[in-house]
């Protein structure tokens, strides 16, 4: 059974990492669009800060999932 569980665990982490990476790219595109359309008001600034934070969180979790999958594969 461990011969099946380990590859499934690796695949799960890679899929989660992929989804987080896609979310990060979508948020980054929205962030860049917001930077180009920045009007200088507090609402625009608040959105940019929120999108920047969301991008960092999604990118971190995406990378962490890929690194965890690699670590599981090496063990």
Image (cartoon, rainbow, N blue to C red):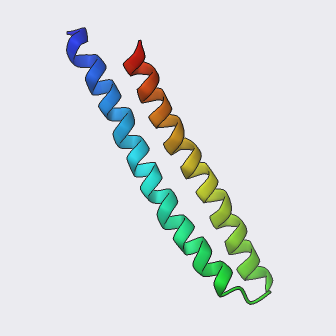
In the rendered image, residue 6, in percent from the top left (x then y), is placed at 30, 18
Quarter holding residue 55: bottom right
Quarter the C terminus occupies: top left
Q: Is residue 37 above or below residue 49?
A: below
In the rendered image, residue 22, in percent from the top left (x then y), is placed at 42, 57
Number of callouts in the render?
0
Quarter the N terminus occupies: top left
The residue lying at 53 percent from left, 71 percent from top is 29
The residue lying at 71 percent from left, 85 percent from top is 38
Q: Is residue 70 above or below residue 21?
A: above
Quarter holding residue 8: top left
Quarter holding residue 34: bottom right
The residue lying at 65 percent from left, 84 percent from top is 36
Q: Is residue 5 above or below residue 63?
A: above
In the rendered image, residue 11, in percent from the top left (x then y), is placed at 30, 32
Taking 42 as reference, is 20 left or right?
left
Q: Residue furthest front?
A: 74
Taking 6 as reference, is 13 left or right?
right
Taking 56 as reference, is 29 left or right?
left
Report the front residue among 45 and 31.
Answer: 31
Report the front residue among 50 and 13.
Answer: 13
């Amino acid at each position: 059974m461990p011969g099946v569980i380990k590859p499934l665990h690796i695949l799960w982490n890679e899929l989660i990492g992929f989804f987080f990476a896609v979310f990060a790219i979508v948020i980054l595109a929205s962030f860049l669009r917001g930077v180009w359309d920045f009007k200088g008001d507090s609402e625009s600034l608040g959105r940019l800060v929120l999108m920047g934070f969301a991008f960092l969180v999604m990118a971190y979790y995406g990378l962490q999932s890929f690194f965890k999958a690699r670590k599981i594969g090496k063990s």
